[in-house]
Amino acid sequence: MRKQRKFKIEGHEKSVEVYELSVRQIIGLMEDASLGDSSLPALKSLFVDKLLPLGSNLSYEELVDMYPSEIKECWEKFREVNASFFDGLDTMGLTGLINTVKVAIIKDFSNLLVSSSRQDTPTS
């Protein structure tokens, strides 16, 4: 039976639900991720268009309106219901690979934020 978890985040009316992913869904996500495009827009699309609707009842707009601590809470609940999958990654020694990808995504995202927030300064 598919595991799921429903919980409330203080200050939000809607209850959040996170779902266990099936093997087919995980394989599909891995295939999509391995298509070679690791650009920030491609990774964002994979997350927004595929993982988010498969793993939760949240929309992208709801997610981006959350605070990082609230997103962390959602991620922790998602990891709980998908513990067997994440344990399997540990067993296969793939956790390091996942962490490397996560660091690369954070670095790319940080670079994107910095470059998009630079203001043109008039030169004298």
Image: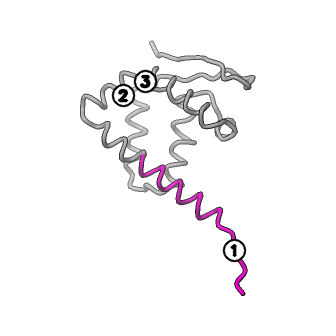
Mark 3 — residue? 82
Q: Quadrant of residue 96?
A: top left
Q: Amino acid at mark 2?
A: Phe
Do labels 1 and 3 touch, CB within 8 Å? no
Q: Nearer the viewer, residue 105 or 22?
A: 105
**Label 3 element class:** loop
Mark 1 — residue? 120
Foreground disc of the pair 1, 3: 1
Does residue 66 sit above or below 82 in this rendering? below
Seen at 40% across and 33% down, the residue is 26
Percent from the top left, x then y, of residue 28? 41, 38
Percent from the top left, x then y, of residue 37? 43, 56
Do labels 3 and 2 touch, CB within 8 Å? yes
Magenta range: 103-124
Seen at 32% across and 36% down, the residue is 95
Q: Quadrant of the C terminus?
A: bottom right
Q: Residue furthest front?
A: 124
Q: Nearer the viewer, residue 45 or 81?
A: 81
**Residue 80 magenta-highlighted:** no
Q: What is the distance, in whole Å, between disc 3 and disc 2 at their CAs?
A: 6 Å
Do labels 2 and 1 touch, CB within 8 Å? no
**Label 1 element class:** loop
**Which of the numbered marks, if any, corresponds to residue 86?**
2
Q: What is the distance, in whole Å, between disc 1 and disc 3 at their CAs?
A: 45 Å
Dot 1 or dot 3, earlier in sequence: 3
Dot 2 or dot 1, earlier in sequence: 2
Q: What is the distance, in whole Å, between disc 2 and disc 1 at their CAs?
A: 44 Å
